[in-house]
Amino acid sequence: MIEKSDFEQLETQLDAYASQKKLKSQEAQPVIDDYFEMILNYFKQINEIDHINFDKLSEYPVVPMNFDERYHYMVARNIILWGIAR
C-alpha cells in the first residue's frame, strides 16, 4: 500500500537533484521514473483498478481535475515539471 511517506522519500531525493540542477542526470532519471510510476500506482490503488483506462476516467470514484491532461503533460515533460514544481 502506497502512503504519503513513500512519496516524501522520493520527493526528498528529487529536491536534492533539482537544487543541484541535476534532474537530467543519469542518477536522477530512475528517481523521476519511480516517482511517476508511484503516482500512477497510487491512482490505481485509490480507485481499486489494475489498469487506467483514460476513456473511462469519469467512471472512477477518485479522479483529480484534468487528470488526463496532467498525465500527458508529465509524460512529455517530467524533468521540466519537477524543476518547476520545486
Image (cartoon, helix red, strand yellow):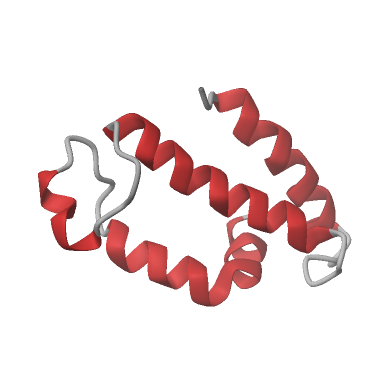
**Residue occupying the far bottom of the picture:** 76
Q: Quadrant of residue 79?
A: bottom right
In the displayed orientation, state which residue is furthest to the front.
50
Is residue 66 toward the left or the right of residue 60 in the image? right
> Residue at left 49%, top 45%?
39
In the rendered image, residue 19, in percent from the top left (x then y), is placed at 83, 57
For residue 40, above or below residue 12: below
Q: How many discs mark residues in the rendered view?
A: 0
Rendered location of residue 51, percent (x, y): 33, 49
**Horizontal arrangement in the rendering, residue 32 relative to residue 70 (left or right):** right
Residue 50, compared with residue 27, is above or below; it is: above
Near-viewer residue (80 or 29): 29
Rendered residue at 47%/41% (across/down): 41
Compared to 72, does 63 lie above or below? above
Looking at the image, residue 85 sits to the left or right of residue 26; the answer is left
Q: Horizontal and vertical percent for residue 62?
A: 23, 37
Does residue 19 sit above or below 11 in this rendering?
Answer: below
- Tell me which residue sits at (61%, 35%) in the image: 7
- Which image quadrant is residue 18 in? bottom right
Nearest to the observer: residue 4 or residue 34: 34
Extreme residue toward the left, this view: 59
Q: Quarter holding the C terminus?
A: bottom right
User: Left or right of 85: which side holds 64?
Assistant: left
Please report the residue visible at 81 percent of the width from the left and 59 percent of the height from the top.
28
Q: Quadrant of residue 49?
A: top left
